[in-house]
Image: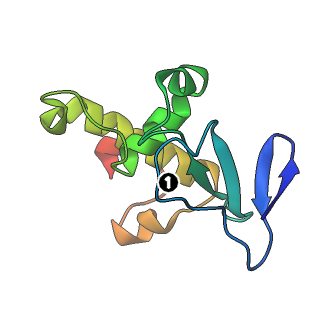
């Protein structure tokens, strides 16, 4: 079961969204908050991926889907180095925004960076 909170659904402990083994059950996009910190969502979408307007309204979602390999890439996109670099830039931005700096020690860096070429 879910409870609504500012346009998003929040899962209650021990509950799960309904799952149906039949097409056409999901009529609208519903985001479920899985955890608050760090923030994680589950997104139930009609079809396999969100419709194009979803990414037009939320461009950061496209980068998030791409960084987690959930966005079908256009023909040749799997080998598009610049596109993958943009996904990496988004992940680095999110890590810095959320204060997740473990990459600094992992890659023996002097400090955080905003440049994916430094990592």
Residue drawn at x 77%, y 52% is: 9
Left or right: 58 in relation to 39: left
Foreground residue among 64 and 27: 27
Visible in this render: residue 69? Answer: yes
Foreground residue among 57 and 115: 57
Q: Is residue 118 above or below residue 34?
A: above
Q: Is residue 99 above or below residue 108?
A: above
Q: Position of residue 79 (x, y in %)?
A: 13, 36
Foreground residue among 49 and 82: 49
Q: Position of residue 12 (x, y in %)?
A: 80, 70
Q: Look at mark 1 in the image and give the residue it sits on.
A: 112
Residue drawn at x 71%, y 65% is: 37
Q: Which type of secondary structure does the marked residue at label 1 adopt?
A: loop
Quadrant the N terminus occupies: bottom right
Foreground residue among 91 and 17: 17
Residue drawn at x 56%, y 27% is: 54
């Amino acid at each position: 079961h879910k409870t609504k909170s500012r346009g998003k659904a929040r899962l209650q402990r021990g509950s799960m969204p309904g799952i149906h083994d039949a097409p056409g059950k999901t009529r609208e996009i519903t985001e479920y908050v899985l955890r608050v910190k760090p923030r994680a969502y589950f997104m139930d979408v009609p079809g396999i991926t969100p419709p194009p307007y979803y990414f037009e309204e939320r461009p950061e979602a496209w980068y998030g889907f791409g960084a987690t390999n959930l966005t079908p890439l256009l023909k040749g996109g799997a080998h598009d180095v610049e596109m993958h670099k943009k996904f990496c830039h988004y992940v680095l931005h999110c890590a810095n925004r959320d204060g997740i700096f473990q990459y600094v020690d992992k890659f023996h860096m002097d400090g955080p960076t905003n440049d994916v070429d430094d990592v």
